[in-house]
Amino acid sequence: MTANADDTARAGDADTGLLRTILGGQYARVNNAVFSADGRLIVTASQDNTARIWDAESGLLLGTLAGHNTQIYWTRFSPDGKLIATTSADGTVQIHIADLHRLLHRARQQLLIESSR
């Protein structure tokens, strides 16, 4: 799985190394892309302030997760695939219900920066 500056993500076959699908449709650079634990879904995080859920086999867009005010840096599925977490440059973490494409919870991050002195 790769996230790309050309506004796409690309999923390859782990056994053959061949390209399985190209996920297009983000309107800005894709920062992060991950498979669900069962391999059926992919979620991408983009500089267009959205995360998108894709069918891993067909490449079909299944839903868009919105709500962040700035680009999304990171996204992950819960181990059971029912929830998706996203983090953004706006300092928030959002938890979404994967199959409903709906926001469940929003919280502000608390970042700790240690001095190198």
Image (cartoon, rainbow, N blue to C red):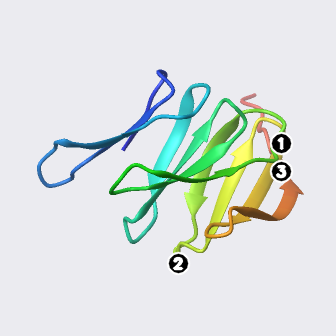
CB under 8 Å between callouts 3 and 1? yes
- Kind of element beneath mark 1: loop
**Residue in the image at 68% along x and 62% along y:** 101
Considering depth in this image, is 71 or 101 the residue closer to the camera? 101
Q: Residues within 10 Å of mark 2 (few under 14, many from 20)?
A: few
Q: CA distance from mark 2 to mark 3?
A: 24 Å
**Is label 2 or label 3 in front?**
2
Q: Position of residue 84 (x, y in %)?
A: 63, 62
Q: Residues within 10 Å of mark 1 (few under 14, many from 20)?
A: some
Task: Say which quadrant the N terminus sits in.
Answer: top left
Q: CA distance from mark 1 to mark 2?
A: 26 Å
Q: CA distance from mark 3 to mark 1?
A: 5 Å
Q: Which residue does the numbered mark 1 point to in the structure image?
A: 91
- Residue 75 marker: none
Q: Is residue 49 above or below residue 55?
A: above
- Kind of element beneath mark 2: loop
Q: Residue 22's quadrant in the figure? A: top left
Q: Which residue does the numbered mark 3 point to in the structure image?
A: 109
Task: Say which quadrant the C terminus sits in.
Answer: top right
